[in-house]
Amino acid sequence: MVRNVITGLIDTRTARARLKARKEPFWITLATGEALGYFRPQNGGAGTWFARFYDSRTRKRMKKSLGTADDFADADDRDVFTCAQAQTKAREWFEEMRSTARGEVHRQGPLTVAQAWEAYEDYSERRGKKGLPGTRQLVEAHILPSLGKTEVIELTQWVIERWHSAIAKAPARVRAKKDQAPAFKAAPTTDYEKRARRATANRILTVLKAILNFAKHRGLTRVNSDAWREVKPFEGVVASRQRFLTPEEAQRLVNVCPPDFKRLVQGALYTGARFGELARMVVSDFNPSEGKVTIGPSKNNPHPRHAVLQAEGREFFKDLTAGRRGDQPMFLRESFANRNSKSAKVIRTWRKSEPARCMIEACEASGLESLTFHELRHTHASGLVNNGVPLAFVAAQLGHSDTRMVEKHYGHLAPSAMADAIRALAPKLGIFSESKVESLVIKKGSKA
């Protein structure tokens, strides 16, 4: 909360009564380039409050009348103001002037959660954040319907905790087309389903906190406390990822896939890349001499990375790119120009929703438990960890900036792999000679 400036010059009626009338108001500085003035008329009537603002960019000074001083009438904070009320009104005008100087549309009235999201969305879009479309869907589905019209200054810890708990108890949404009404699964009943919903509620809470923190740091709202910081996420809801394919299961899956989807699945298993990264990959991204594939910027990493290929993966990409132009998409989709008539086949890039349907069909054909396309990435990472690859190398292969995500999702696999690696690679020191004393073994039935 901004503190009022006290100088003893114009703060009280008594102090203002001692001032002599003059043409220029009596000014006190509130901040750099910002001042509050009191003008005392010569006829002895009530004085007037003024605000003065200096725009350092244009080097112009602007002045505005704020209202009447409470020299003779009680203040009503509408037409008649005390010095403290005049300072508050002046600061509101200063904020409007600063917004105008920045070329922004000045917001009138208290900031709502919806307005805070609009500002955060604009900032994220200008920064080119990769995950913005997903964040926008999450906000529109879970935050705006319940909290969008609520003023940020009215958000209390109890309000946010009640909203957070309601999300955890609500049934999960089912993906639907744009022109279809939202669909939902059954309400969570098992421990696994409840834990999954709580994990989802935690992710949504994190987004809400990011929006509100942005609004406060940018000075869009003047809240006295951060009620949202006191809201704690549900504990013990994030479990390590357990679903991944064994080499035998991966072979079964690949064998039943149609040719175009088979290549996409193989690419995911060899590189650990996400579907979006594979869909954007071009032929020139493969470097046969180094045995690496360049994977473009991801949702969390603005810089491309280079996935290392093992021998089998290198041969796969050599065969996939042989005789093709470097600017062609690496993975192509074979489909019919008219799905109903199935007349002529066309070659095009993969669309976002297609791998999910193909994966369902492949799992049914191979007799495997249902899994998502993204779990092929988990399979790649789990295979590296199980074979003793250091977690730092696994993180670099997956495009993570550090090992936290790898430890969180695959750390449960590391202890056995670490033990095998230490036993195989640790140096022999030769500092112990085996003793000739044998342990005493007591046979059953004998008396000790």
Image: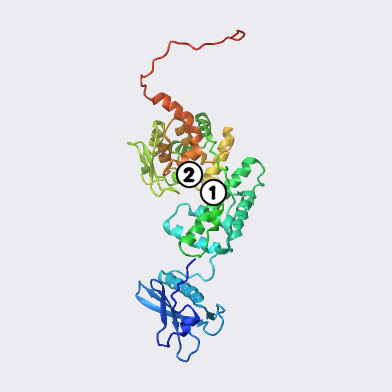
For the residues carrying marks 2 and 1, which lies nearer the camera in this image?
Answer: 2
Report the front residue among 45 and 18: 18
Report the front residue among 360 and 47: 47
Local crowd at mark 2 within 10 Å, few (<14), some, or many (≥20)?
A: many
When asked about the image quadrant of residue 162, the answer is bottom right
Q: Position of residue 253 (x, y in %)?
A: 53, 34
Q: Quadrant of the C terminus?
A: top right
Which secondary structure, mark 2? helix
Q: Position of residue 300 (x, y in %)?
A: 44, 48
Between marks 2 and 1, how big is the CA–CA gap? 25 Å
- Amino acid at circle 1: Asn
| Residue 261 visible within the image | no
Q: Position of residue 254 (x, y in %)?
A: 50, 34
Q: Is residue 43 shown above or below 397?
A: below
Q: Is residue 140 shown above or below 405?
A: below
| Residue 174 visible within the image | yes
Q: Residue furthest top?
A: 446
Q: What residue sits 46% from the left and 81% below the top?
A: 15
Q: Position of residue 122 (x, y in %)?
A: 46, 61
Which secondary structure, mark 1? loop
Q: Earlier in the sequence, mark 2 or mark 1?
A: 2
When asked about the image quadrant of residue 163, the answer is bottom right
Q: Residue furthest bottom?
A: 43
- Amino acid at circle 2: Phe
Q: What residue sits 56% from the left and 49% below the top?
A: 233
Q: Which residue is mark 2?
A: 275
Colouring mode (rainbow / by chain / secondary structure / one colour):
rainbow
Q: Which mark is residue 338?
A: 1
Q: Is residue 133 shown above or below 270?
A: below
